[in-house]
Amino acid sequence: MNRVLLYGMVACALFLNGQTRDERIFVDFQEVMVPMRDGVRLQTVILAPKSPKGPLPFLIDRSPYGVPTKEAVDRGMPAAGRARYENYYVVTQNIRGRFKSEGKFVMGRPPHDPADPKGVDETTDAWDTVDWLIKNIPNNNGRAGIAGTSYDGWTAVMAALDPHPALKAVIEQASPADQFLGDDFHHNGAFRLSYGFEYSAMLETSSTENYRFQFDRGDTYDWYLGLGPLSNADERHLHGKIPTWEDFTHHPSYDRFWQRLAFAPYLNAVKVPIVHVAGWWDRRISTARRRSTRSSNRTTRSIATTSWPGRGTTGSGTETAAAWAPSVSDRTPRSITARTFSSRGSTTGCAA
């Protein structure tokens, strides 16, 4: 009996070892500067399968946080991403003013005035990016999808406002929707001091890195208590160089500035299938409901709500993207399905 138990334990250990082994996936790396309609060029990295199985679609992530480096890619991509790295051209792009991308970075850039024919925003940049990829990357099938989490989820929603004809599906995960009523910077109007200070410093201190503010002590709660009046943050540390912090101080109420940044009113006519993903413990859960209820009709909208906080909506769930392969790869897309995995490994499916 003991021998049987021992053999069983050894077999189980060998099985688990095989399941957790990190087999790397090797892909081709290409970095390009994609031109926008106003001449600004955006740093873009394209990862392609070594042996593509016919023409492939694009899976795009537009971000302020950086793109993969060639050194990292040459070491191989994690096996957990096999579905995406073998079936898509995986595209990561730095938005305007971040890292090597040209132009000016604007936090949560609102849609431009439709009366301005030369106006640009994240919607036009997404359109121009898809257009360039379709016309310049060989062996593609003329289809693209955009997915992202947090800020990258917000850029995904912006792409859906006026989608390129080749854009066939969008997945936004934990995207902010109204930065005054229920997202990162305010909760029902209450300013989130530490988040607002550190995040705006992270993205606006330097264009070439994700800057971490250097506190002089480990207890940051104590640091903020010692800061004193809110004006001291700018006088002592930011020195008028962080535009988003200036916006916080100049717009303490829910005025036209914050209303214009809230994107729910723009979602009345979304033209592509879109999945909204949120977590019950996410700070943005209240605005997740507004995002989903305002986005077009039931034939193009779906929402998946899980038990994750914040960026945990990706988790091992980076594979969410693979789930809408039918919408991007097939000739006649009719539905999208988001497969999401809870902390216990169960599966939740939702389709529209």
Image: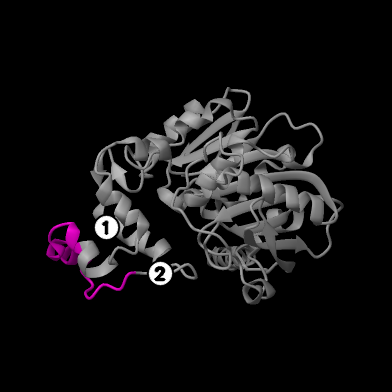
Circle 2 crowding by C-alpha within 10 Å: few under 14, some 14–19, many from 20: some
Residue marked by disc 1: 194
Q: What residue type is labelled 1?
A: Ser
Disc 2 is placed on an element classified as loop
Q: Where is residue 273 in the image (x, y as percent from the top left)?
A: 64, 33
Disc 1 is placed on an element classified as helix
Q: Is residue 88 left or right of residue 300?
A: right
Image quadrant assignment for residue 31: bottom right
Q: Which amino acid does label 2 sit on?
A: Tyr
Would residue 246 be visible to someone looking at this image?
yes
Q: Nearer the viewer, residue 168 or 110?
A: 110
> Residue at image x 52%, y 30%?
267
Q: Give the range drawn in magenta.
A: 213-232
> Residue at image x 50%, y 45%?
154
Q: Where is residue 177 in the image (x, y as percent from the top left)?
A: 43, 39
> Residue at image x 80%, y 65%?
50
